Amino acid sequence: MVKLIALYKKPSDPAEFDKHFYEIHLPLVQSVPGISRVDVTRITGAPFGEARFYLMEELVFESQRVMDTAMSSAQGKSIARDVMSFAANLVVLLQGVPGDSPASPDPNHLPEF
Amino acid sequence: MVKLIALYKKPSDPAEFDKHFYEIHLPLVQSVPGISRVDVTRITGAPFGEARFYLMEELVFESQRVMDTAMSSAQGKSIARDVMSFAANLVVLLQGVPGDSPASPDPNHLPEF
């Protein structure tokens, strides 16, 4: 399982951002071939100080190969264009994999959880 | 469902960070009363440029009340102390809720996804 994570900073007009995000962006993402799941998390605050981000979006794929194929498809390219059109200055993009155990565990000393 | 999200920037010594994270920090988190799940995502890169973060940790609770109780317990406080001991300058903390539909949807015009 691999994830493409988009962290969006607070937009100057949250209502306009939300409208574009839910009405245009999310349906585009959900149409990408091979996508397993899209998780959206609205940031409601931070334990200390002000929250650094407004919204997190996670595109989940079965494998790196499936993600690469999806993101280089016509739909994948239209998502990239869409993000640049409404959130170029807001978005931080990351790729990740589940990491419940260390990156290179010693097979003789696997953590016990 | 609510989440406490910790985004860690790249540590100067990843091996030392990982050792503390998996051997000390994660068992502490998993011992917090009322926690539903801990998801760890290792950041492997970014679609453009360098990845802004190294690791993402998500503590999932059933409700805000359960999270607040957990984080103000003795175990919750020891997690906060632990994070400050090994990642004070690396961590960005956020709270969030699932946001697959807009924050204040008009019940007569729910999005169709």
Image (cartoon, coloured by chain):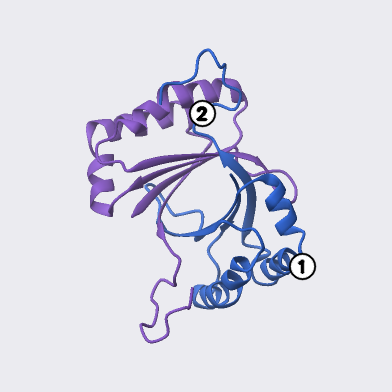
Chain colours: A purple, B blue
User: Which residue is found at the position 36% from the left and 34% from the top?
Assistant: A80
User: Residue under circle 1?
Assistant: B74
Chain ID of residue with mark 1: B
Which x, y percent locates residue B48? 39, 47
Tell me which corner region of the image, top left, top right, bottom left or bottom right, holds residue B24: bottom right
Chain ID of residue with mark 2: B
- The image shows residue B104, relative to residue A95, as above or below, that is above
The amino acid sitting under disc 2 is Ser
User: Which residue is found at the position 27% from the left and 31% from the top?
Assistant: A75
Mark sitting on residue A8 = none
Which x, y percent locates residue A95? 40, 52
User: Which residue is found at the position 76% from the left and 67% from the top?
Assistant: B74
Q: Decide which of B11, B23 is in the foreground and name it.
A: B23
Q: Are marks 1 and 2 on the same chain?
A: yes
Q: How many marks?
A: 2
Mark sitting on residue B101 = 2
Which x, y percent locates residue A23? 44, 21
